[in-house]
Image: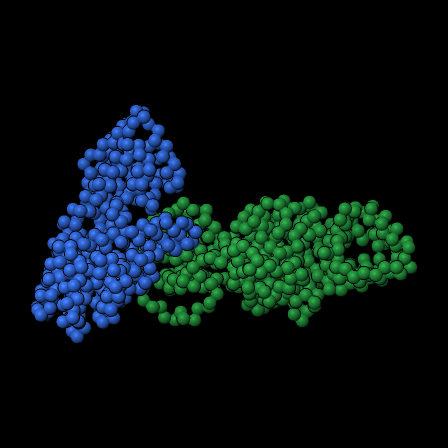
Amino acid sequence: MFFSHLRATRVSPKRASLAAAVLLSAALAWPAYADGLSDARGHIDAGNFSAALTALDEHLREFPQDAEARFTRGLVLVKLTRTDEAIQMFADLTRDYPQLPEPYNNLAVLYAQRGDYEKSRDALEAALATHPSYATAHENLGDVYTALATAAYNRALVLDDSNETVRVKLSLLNQLDSSSVGDTQVATAQPSTPPATAQPAPASTTPVAPVSQAPANTDALVDGVRRALFDWAEAWSNQNVEGYLDSYDVSFLPDDGQSRSAWNNERRRRVAAPGFIRIELIEPTIEILGNGRATVTVGQVYESDTYSDRVTKLMEFRKRGDTWRIVRETVVSTG
Amino acid sequence: MARIHASLASLGLAACAVLATPVSAMPGLLMLPPDPEAQLLSAISQLRDGDSDVAFSTLSRLTRQEPGFRLAQYMYANLLMARAGRSAAELPNERSDAIASLIDEANKRWNHRAGHPNAAGGDTVLPHPLLSLPPTQRYAVVVDLTAGRLYVIENKDGALRVVRDVYATIGRAGMGKEVEGDGRTPIGVYRVTSFLPDSGLPDLYGHGAYPVSYPNAWDRQAGRTGYGIWMHGVPHSTYSRPPQSSEGCVAVANRDLESLAPFIKPGHTPVVFADRVDWIPASEAELLAELLRSKVQNWASDWESLNTDAYLDHYASDFRAGNMDLPAFAAHKHRVNARKNFIDVELDQMEVFRYPAVDERLYLVRFRQRYASDNYKSTSRKEQMWRLTDNGRWEIVNEDNEA
């Protein structure tokens, strides 16, 4: 699933065993389909999506109803940025296998990528109608609701739409991009139920994220947060005001209750004013909360020509596209 | 953001529960009234009742129908954030003034949820500035500038009755226009002078505009300046505007402006911009109107009698007509009347108003006057401002021939 690895930190060991069971049963159910698909997967692993598509098309000529192959074909089309065809592929799957939540979810992601959050919402709600506990769809729906809320809010206050709407779009888009890391495993674990003729397997109601990926992905996320944290400190040290302010998310709320614009002005002045600034970060502890959120506890030594202090800060980051941005910054202790 | 939550709470909108289950189709809502305001009010009352699912569905439909309805979008944004399991405080908060004006709009609309005062039947009450209309005048418009509400009053079979009311935006600086460019909506009694269609206007005015006759004689005497006070629509991308956001005009939603068309006759329809409206029994309005009509009739009779002193006794010592004060006016009348053998005055089509927002008890009468004497004949439209003094004397303080 597109989002699965990003959210893999949430998958419990219990779910992992369920997912494995699904894989096993899927393998037993469709032995005949395996060859063409595994060729395609080899190409996907090698990053050769055109070859993967050719292999899948060949395979589907022989087994036109192979839901798993069709689903994989949809993913490959996404990789080839043939979005219209990908949407068509997943839409066909939702029609042929309305009991499968995954095609709905992917359809939703592609709609969201285009900024069509209403359709995206409808697709996710359809996924949840058959699988009310489908966590990925819930989480995506949360993102889509947030995007819709931002759009509605911008319309309400006649704000510039470039505001946050675009960032939310980017966030979804990049979650799609990052799925390239593990497409094959994800795809293998996909349509976890047999095709339409059979009853949906009970296990398909659980998210089928490949748990083996979780640690690696968490590491990648931690790296991303650490990079954002050090970029922030570096911009501050270099008195690069724009770079410093850019570290803060559009939803960042100043801790002291100031308005964002007043805070911006104050920070602009304070970052630019000293003769020099030196920032040292001590033992950052990064915790990934899932859903594109992370907290950081870090010691901070600040020195300038006029002032110095040492504090411990609690910061919260939110993933926006490829980059993490600060949404909260609180001094938890001083001295 | 705490401020916003507080204001939402004051509307009873705080109950935006986080939903653990997905939205499903809401049954029983297929017959919602198509009027956006009615839908918005349903959503507010659904929220007050704790039915955030139903309110969500109502607002989802409403924002799709009227994407330019900012207040609906704002409420929808809040509910969507609740659904996303996030705090509305995460939304950008740079425009807290704009949010405050949306809350203001919500309150103004909510205050009128029961409809206009005659909607529920019962004894007819009327906006206190409108006392009487002649049979030739089928409708009048009264705008309550404080409430942000425009009322249409119908004159049918000799009785007045409110037939329609819509949300209305006034000047960014409020009301009580004094000078050009002050951003205020005038307070007074005017007339719709014309209709300017959409096609000839900038988008700002939306569906079209009804210019009104500000400044009137009373305004001019008070030294008020400015021009171009209109009742108009809103930009086509917008459903409605915040309560105080015009340059002094009265702006209503385009669909509301369209709905007013059957009631407004350019060149004829009276318009009252009142600072506030008290609702008085129709019988009380009629009693006062009758009193005014008799005073005006006495004035006309004294004029016809050629007893110039008795005629002039109807005028106040601070009377003005254009740039004439009372001594100048008296001299003029003495001179003119001295040469007459007869004067015949007939009055009809009389409109009677209690003048809004003045310290004194002032009443405006407007009528058609057919004047005939041995050497002159004319038909004109006249307006007179009458004052009831603390001593109980009725006197004319201003007189003008309507354009």
Relative to A291, does residue B207 appear above or below in the rendering?
Answer: below
Q: Does the image show residue B41?
A: yes
Is A58 displayed left or right of B55 in the figure? Answer: left
Is A32 displayed left or right of B384 in the figure? Answer: left
Relative to B46, does residue B90 appear above or below in the rendering?
Answer: above
Q: Residue furthest bottom?
A: A197
At which x and y percent is residue B372? 84, 62
Q: Does the image show residue B277?
A: no
Instruction: Name the image quarter holding residue A134.
Output: bottom left
Q: Residue at x 23, y 37 (%)?
A: A230
Is A15 displayed left or right of B60 in the figure? Answer: left
| Quarter of the picture holding the C terminus of chain B | bottom right
Question: For this rendering, which residue is in front, A5 or B174?
Answer: A5
Q: Residue at x 18, y 36 (%)?
A: A283
Q: Residue at x 73, y 53 (%)?
A: B385
Instruction: Name the image quarter holding residue B306.
Output: bottom right
At which x and y percent is residue A276? 29, 27
Is B142 displayed left or right of B391 in the figure? Answer: left
Instruction: Name the image quarter holding residue B347.
Output: bottom right
Q: Colour of chain B?
A: green
At which x and y percent is residue B99? 44, 50
Q: Colour of chain A?
A: blue
How are the residues colored? by chain
Relative to A317, does residue A77 appear above or below in the rendering?
Answer: below
Q: Residue at x 70, y 67 (%)?
A: B136
Question: For this rendering, which residue is in front, A223 or B20?
Answer: A223
